[in-house]
Image (tube, helix red, strand yellow):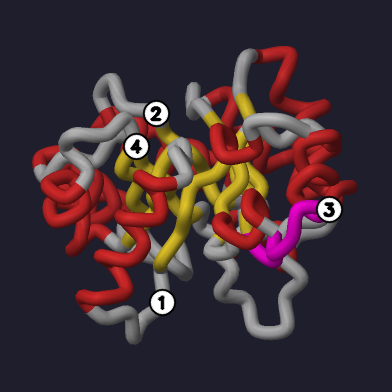
Amino acid sequence: MKDLNKHIEHTLLKQDAKHEDFLKLFKEAEEYKFLGVCINPLYVKFAKEQLKHTDVKVVTVVGFPLGANRSDVKAFETSKAIEDGADEIDMVINVSKLKDKDYDFVLNDIKTVKTSCKDKPLKVILETDLLTKDEIKKACELCIEAKADFVKTSTGFVKGGVGAKAEDVKLMYDTVSPYGLQVKASGGIRDKETAIKMLEAGAERLGTSSGVKIVAG
């Protein structure tokens, strides 16, 4: 498959990432012409400065990694990230509220962040490792209703979690694609074979810290 790099968001969300790790990430993103980098909110301004002469998008995360922040806090975090130069926002859904079937809360949580995004794309992280197939489908339906732009599999932070699974990506794609939403597969994508499998299942984006290995072997 050609142009794998154009699907990859080169990701560094580690708690112990150092300055030199970010510089390496940005350099690799530029060298391999990845679609974007995905980093924590504090580093958005730094990323934007380092990548200003490139086409690499700066993507950041909100309510990460648990999704259990108040909606107004997620919205504030989103506004600040966009002020700092974020091109796209990946928010974490409130999994507890979804499992409690408090769908109004989940819907309004997504809508609140979407409003703060203004014209910037919003991806909603479902955390598929923690959900049943029915819950994945319901979460996707809420994202459609909230007018999100993408649904995303995982944070990559669930202990013992698999991350993205092709069957979940296909379920998400089948649910949201008729309404114009796209799918981002993230978590556990560490080689070319897995990356291609996710794209074939319907993913448009791949969130991975193994981008260089995937495209360069």
Q: Is residue 103 above or below residue 175?
A: below
Between the C-alphas of marks 1 and 4, the distance is: 20 Å
Checking the image for residue 121, the label placed there is 2
Helix, strand or loop at mark 3: helix
Q: Classify residue 150 as left or right of residue 179.
A: left
Residue range in magenta is 187-194
Instruction: Report if residue 163 is visible in the image.
Output: yes
- Is there a contact, CB below 8 Å, between mark 1 and mark 4? no
Q: Residue tagged by mark 3? A: 193
Q: Amino acid at mark 3?
A: Glu
Residue indicated by mark 1? 14
Q: Nearer the viewer, residue 211 or 124?
A: 211
- x 18%, y 63%: residue: 42
Mark closer to the observer (1, 4): 4
Q: Quadrant of the N terminus?
A: top right
Which residue is depicted at the point 53% across and 64% down? Answer: 209
Horizontal and vertical percent for residue 31?
A: 40, 47
Labels 1 and 4: the sequence-earlier one = 1
Q: Nearer the viewer, residue 216 or 55?
A: 216
Q: Is residue 191 magenta?
A: yes
Residue 47: image location, x then y, percent: 21, 52
Q: Earlier in the sequence, mark 3 or mark 1?
A: 1
